[in-house]
Image (cartoon, coloured by chain):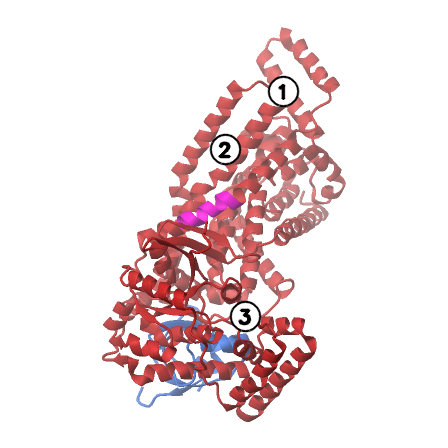
Amino acid sequence: MNLRTLQSGQTGIISAVKIGGPLGLRIREMGLVPGTKIRITGRAPLYDPVKLRINGQTLTLRNNEANFIEVRIEEGA
Amino acid sequence: MTAKDSLHIALAGNPNAGKTTLFNNLTGAHQHVGNYPGVTVEKKEGICTHEGNEIRVVDLPGTYSLTAYSVEELVARDYLVNEQPDVVVNIVDASNLERNLYLSCQFLELGVPLVIALNMIDVAEKRGIRIDTEKLSEFTGVPVVPVIARSGKGVNELLKTVQKVSQTGAAPPRTLIRYGADIDEALKDLIPVLEEHKLLGSAYPASWTALKILENDEQIVAKVMLENMKVGQELVDRSETLARHLQDTIDAYPETVIADHRYGFVRSILRQGEVTRITDQDRLYASDQIDKVVTNRVVGPLLMAAILFGLYSFTFNWSGFLVDWMGMCFAFLGSLAESALPDGPIKSMIISGVIDGVGGVLGFVPIIMFMFFGIALLEDSGYLARVAFMMDRIFHFFGLHGSSVMPFIISGGIAGGCAVPGVMAVRTLRSPKERMATLLTVPFMNCGAKLPVLTLIIAAFFPAHQARYMFLATLVAWLVALLVAKLLRMTLLRGESTPFVMELPPYRVPTLKGLFIHTWERTWQYIKKAGTVILGISILLWAMMTYPGLPSDKVADFEAMRQQVVTSADKAEELLRIDQLEAEAGLRHSIAGRIGMSLEPISHFAGFDWRTNIALVGGFAAKEVIVSTLGTAYSLGEVDPEETTSLTDRLASDKHWNPVAALAFLFFIMFYSPCFVTVVAIAKEAGSWKWAFFSMGFNTVFAFSMAVGIFQLGTVLGLG
């Protein structure tokens, strides 16, 4: 499932990051790598960017950047 | 400043890991800020003493990685390679080990003499993370010292370790990280070739260069190619074979596979027992609760508007008493010079050139100081990142960044700001293209100096709806600035927008020491760097409006006229009238006057006569000068920008002026070349004069086209 489609409060585990280049590296160096648990903590007033919790930090990214991140929704979450 | 045998260390680490706090703690007030050569990244240096020895400390820009994709990262790694600090102190946030150690991996790859300063262990412990520093040290092969940068705990121990490492030197590089079979094999192919040909051999370890070639690092590939085109091409070919292979087999890029393996290495360290998570209670609980309100859909924007308005009034109103006080000081100096010096060109230069010039430079200081204090407060508390978060949707649409909003507001987004501090506020933006687009468009805002000119024209030609027109002017400024930003980002500054993948730091109470250091170092930089240039140009502009003086026969004519009125009844008034006529003739005769006259054939397309032109030339010194120069040009004497009734009446009744010409003039003033103080500030922030000159030229041409359009259309429609 695409990270973009996640609702506020939903949690999941990153299953793939489907982009290389500067953006792909940037996403990874901020800790968004496969196997990492994430939780959507909110969105900006105009719905974009999105705010999420990962490794005990808060990250933001734009919707069109979230497009490249695939997430597996945790059962029972 | 540094003895040869003094120790030289560099602080490196993630943003928000406590690097600056540690730096302030180590060096106290003994620091100075400069720039890295050729770029606008701040370089902070300081001295600290440990057991009687001086240690030179350099604070590298905070980065998450060491790629070639951002200026900060390039600066950091170039510094490590070229300046070869004796020891690199890597500040690692213990409460966020995974991402912080990702950067540490890259220092290990680079093979620099490293000490890890494990910061915020107190926070980590509260979160239930206990870290076995000995094991961490064992796995990474470098000393690890726990510190609390905020309180200074552990700093002594850190310095001791640093000294020890500096004596023993770097541990021989070991292969710690495996990047998977495909990449390890490619590395095995590349490294011997690099070693054989000694490519970049003196500066970088071959293993690192090989890794960077596989990552397709632009800077390193270019360097290798420069040294040996033929071998370089072989290496690049090998790298491309790998890339194709990875693409075919696992649908991934080499650089991302490498990144994933670095994380694998970090996780293996964390798994092998040096981290014990007892409880993982959310340390961000408080921060999250604040965010629920602060970034709420309804409350968030309202609160942001209030806070930005607060920053604005803090910057411009609270600094007012200091500005007035300085103004009084310089007025006093001026009157002192007036009475003490003999009449003549020297006196005129000292008063109008030097004293006004220095006054002009220092007059901005209180505003800049207050602004930087306000920004430091927003930045250090973590609020600024939230502003960027909330505004990004709008500003991203125009090719800018969420953080662009603040420079716009300070420059006059709320009418009455100032583009000089506005331009300097642009440095909080990290993305180069968005930053440049912001830098070039903030001068379009209606700064405090444009206001008296706008007020004058509106009062003369649109007296019925003054408030409405002023408000419209603010809206038009925003609209034009954003559209031009979009235009620039589609043409000259074209390119992918910088990713918004960024950290929202937890809210923190800023330390007073940190705030004052930030404020002072930035203000001092303005005085030192911009001040001298501004003073020089100020004298130049004074000379342009003064020289050449009237020829002696003209002066004699005016003198003769004065003699004639001696008998007249209202002698004082007549004499004043003659003075004003002489001033007008003098201005007309000066270089500025000649420029104004020679431009008339072009400027009349926009409805400007030579008088207006001179005033606009004068406006380059400072926009409010337009009013006083117009006064002189219309033989009214120097008009006080605060008291313009005589000029309003004069313009309203002049046959050259009509509402259409006035509107064209209004638009021109709003958008033409920034005043030279702003231009100097742009040059400093952009890191080159090229963009400063571009700003002057582009804005003037742009504003002129608008003015011509308005004037011609209005005239054709018969609205004049």
Q: Is residue B72 above or below residue B637?
A: below
Residue closer to the observer: B670 or A39: A39
Q: Is residue B149 above or below residue B417?
A: below
Q: Mark 2 or mark 3, which has the lower sequence index?
A: 3
Chain colored blue: A
Image colour for chain B is red
Q: Tell me which amino acid carries mark 3.
A: Tyr
What amino acid is found at the position of numbered circle 2 in the picture?
Answer: Glu
> Where is residue B161 shown, x and y percent of the image?
34, 66
State which mark lies toward you, 2 or 3.
3
Q: Which mark is residue B69?
A: 3
Which callout, 3 or 1, points at the residue further toward the start of the chain?
A: 3
Residue on which disc 1 sits: B579
Tell whether label 1 touches label 3 (CB within 8 Å).
no
Q: Report in which chain the residue with disc 3 lies.
A: B
How many angstroms separate mark 1 from mark 2 (CA)? 22 Å
Residue denoted by label 2: B642
State the residue at coordinates (45%, 42%): B365
Image location (x, y in percent) of residue B425 = 47, 53
Asked which secondary structure carries label 1, the reply is helix
